Amino acid sequence: MPSTSGLSGARAFVGVNCGAIPTSLIASELFGHEKGAFTGATQRRLGRFEARTAHHFSDEVGDLPPDIQIALLRVLQEREIDRIGRDRPIPVDVRVLAATHRDLDKLVSEGKFRQDLLYRLNVVPITMPPLRERRPTFPSLSNTSLPDLEKDG
């Protein structure tokens, strides 16, 4: 689900697997924190969104807790982040590409995912069937991919 919130040009690529980060650390990982913002914050840490001009890939966005969904919505709408412990927002210019294996429409209906965030992320939806449903395409996929992998060693 690509969502553009910025102009194109030379950009860094920043990826993060949201499902692999413990809930207690995800805000700090994505948005950073100031020294002393919480116990154990011995130095300032920049978050993944602070690559101010970047393409940002958020994998497993369906696993984000509600408070982080709100913060991600703020990135998309306001183009700014709130670093933990900082008293003013930081402007960012990012393009967000989000992926998940979850049915976000179902999560919205269950109240587990924000409808407004889904709306912002779902600009160009790309639905991929699972590999188990694509067995007939395995030969052509391998014939296309294996020569490239062999070149790379």
Image: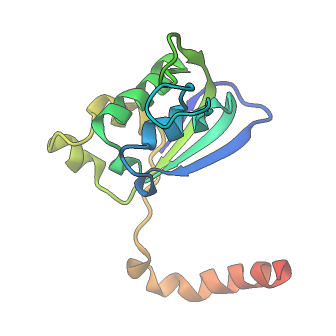
Q: Is residue 136 above or below residue 8?
A: below
Image coordinates of residue 31 in percent, x first then y, are 52, 31
- The single residue placed furthest to the bottom in the displayed view is 139
In the rendered structure, the answer to whether residue 112 lies left or right of residue 145 reads left
Return the residue nearer the eye: 45 or 52. 45
Kindly indicate the quadrant of the structure image that contains residue 121.
top left
Image coordinates of residue 107 in percent, x first then y, are 22, 47
What residue do we see at 41% from left, 47% from top? 61
In the rendered structure, the answer to whether residue 38 lies left or right of residue 141 reads left
In the rendered structure, the answer to whether residue 122 lies left or right of residue 106 reads right
Q: Is residue 85 above or below residue 61?
A: above
What residue do we see at 52% from left, 41% from top? 29
Q: How is the image coloured?
A: rainbow
What residue do we see at 55% from left, 50% from top? 16
Image coordinates of residue 136 in percent, x first then y, are 48, 86
Labels in figure, total: 0
Kindly indicate the quadrant of the structure image that contains residue 122.
top left
Image quarter in which the C terminus is found: bottom right
In the rendered structure, the answer to whether residue 87 lies left or right of residue 140 reads left
Image coordinates of residue 115 in percent, x first then y, are 27, 33
